[in-house]
Each structure stands twice: as structure tokens, then as C-alpha cells.
Image (tube, rainbow, N blue to C red):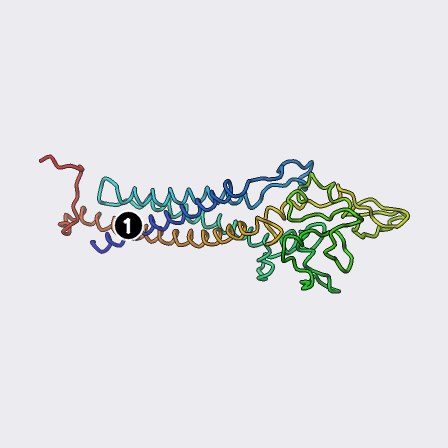
Amino acid sequence: MKNQQGTSNCSLLTLSIVSAIQGLVTFGALFMSLPTLFDLNVFDPNSGATEELRQPDGPGDLAVLESIVAAFSFAGGVGAATITLGSRWQIKNSNMLKVATVAYVLCFVISMIFSFMRINTLGYAYTWNLPFGTNTSTCLDTNWETGCPTTRFENKYDNTSWIKDDDFQIESIEQCKFNAYDNSSKIAYDSTVAGISKPDWADKTYYDVNQRELLVTAAERINLKAKTVDGKLECDYGTPDTTTEKCIIGKDDLPNIAWCWYWGCHDVCNDRYKVNQTWLVLSLSSTFLYLVLAVISGFAVYMTEKEEMGYEYIFANNVAPESGAVFRSNRLDFT
């Protein structure tokens, strides 16, 4: 009986310590990074007339949800262990621990989903060849319709696929000025297009869907041929020009790339790169720790139930309790 009681107490103490450290560190790091160092929704999240033009702060929203889960984990773990250890009776009840175990399993599943979302959008899932990995609408996407400007700049099309262009890697913030919509075979570091300064992709203004008029001059370099359908010129994007038989791209035809800024898709041109990498580490570590906490809590349930069964046997058979196993109905003995 003593061994069982000591083991259950040890598991409960471990549960409290691990949940306290995990909850406080995760909540503190997320809380400090989001409202203190970075603002949530630097662009108007509901400014677009359609769903495609809305620009919510995806990673920021995940960080808020993760901080709530971490706070819940901290309160639940410490509370369940404290209530079980500090109950009026020395005989423990495992019901609270069962609830905590289920809660930790849910936290693990939620955190795993958040981690997968971060891994995928940041491009690691595609790089690591994970089953759910894709480069579409991720930091590795080179398509002008769905990808990020900096990714397209640092890669080139090599007959069949896009590959890293060693000649054009951004190493300083001054090199963040370029025309991301020039689909010629070679993109240079020229500072102007037709006498007008190129977009500065280190400036979040150019990522705002409401500021797309700033990119019209750059978008004119998009070289899309119009299609002939039933004798008429048509364009998937833009307006057909009967003279050149090409598609003229206006500001309303440009894609919504606000997410590229929020997710910090470049380590030089985007000041949110490091915070997104930090959030990814926190998501992965939280997922692992929630699994550990679920296992510890489940083990504590098992040991506590064994302890309960031992006490039930003592009461049922009038067996003298072991030395140190004292039963009392009151906290204070006035006799």
C-alpha cells in the first residue's frame, strides 16, 4: 500500500510540475511575442469583398488559440493534481485525473493540428516529403497567383520545374526591391521599372490587398497570352488586348499575398520570420509535452485506482491499516 501511495503521489507531483512549466512557458512566450513585439492583424482582416480577398492573421490567430490551450493545460493539470493530493480524505479519487487525461489527449490532438498547419504553410512539409505536404499557397510556392514574391525571386524555371537560383539569393534588405511579376527568364536587381521604383518587399504595405494599386506598374510586366475561344480572345486573369493578343493585368487581378507577410516567408525581407519559426518550435514542443502529460496522467489514474482498491479491501475486511496510513473524518482532533 505504501509503495502504491508513494508512486501515485510521485506521478501527481510530476504531472503538476510538467504542466506548470509547459503551460507557463508556452503561454508566456506566445503572450509576449504577439501583443508586445508584434501586432495581431496589421492588415484589415475583413476588408475584402470576397473570401479570397480577406486577410486574417493566420499564424497570429493560431498563437492566440495555443496560448488559451496552454493556460487551460496549466490550470487543469495543477488543479487536478492539487485537488487529488489535497483532498479532505487521504484516500484519493481518480475521477478528476480521468478528466485531466481526456483533456490532455484533446490538447495533444489540437496542438498536433496546429503544428501540421505551421509545418505545411512554412514549407517544411513539402521539403520533408510528408504525405500532406504541398508547395501551393505555402512559403515555397513560386506561382505568381498563389505564391510569395521573395520565393519567386530566388527560384528559376528550369524546363520542367522550379529550382533554386544561386545567382539571385537575397542577402541584404536592400535587395528586397524587385519586380516579383516580371516573368522573363532573368530578373535583375534593378531599382526601377519604367522609371518608377520597384516594390520594396520588406515593406508590409505592398502585401496589403487594399494597396494593390502600388503594384500596377510592376504587374504590367506579367506576360500572359490571351486564349482564343470561339473566335474571341479570353483571359483567365486580366483583360485581353486585341492588338498584342495578351492579357493586361490590373490591380484587381493581382493575388492576395497578405499571408506571405504574416507567415514571415523570408528571413531577410520579413521581420516576422523569426517569430514564426519560434511559434513552430513552441507548437511542436507543446504537442510532445501534451502527449507526455496524457501518459503521466493516465499512469496516475492507474496507480490511484490501485490505491483506491487497496483501501476498499481494508475497509471491507477490517484489516489493520499499515503504519502511516491514517484515516480521519476531521482535520482537527479535539479529543
On the picture, is 320 further left or further right than 183? left
On the picture, is 111 further left or further right than 323? right
Residue type at the position of mark 1: Thr
Q: Quadrant of residue 103?
A: top left
Q: Quadrant of the C terminus?
A: top left
- Position in image of residue 202 (x %, y %): 64, 48
Q: Nearer the viewer, residue 222 or 204?
A: 204
Residue that numbered label 1 is attached to: 304
Residue at screen point 27% across, 50% down: 9
- Position in image of residue 112 (x %, y %): 49, 52
Using a 10 Å C-alpha cutoff, classify the residue at mark 1 as few (fewer than 14 neighbours), some (14 to 19) or many (20 or more).
many
On the picture, is 6 further left or further right than 114? left
Residue at screen point 60% across, 50% down: 270
Q: Is residue 311 above or below residue 127?
A: above
Q: Nearer the viewer, residue 71 or 151?
A: 151
- Position in image of residue 234 (x %, y %): 84, 47
The number of callouts visible is: 1
Residue at screen point 42% across, 48% down: 25
Residue sitting at the far left: 335
On the picture, is 86 further left or further right than 320? right
- Position in image of residue 281 (x %, y %): 49, 54
The secondary structure type at the circle numbered 1 is helix
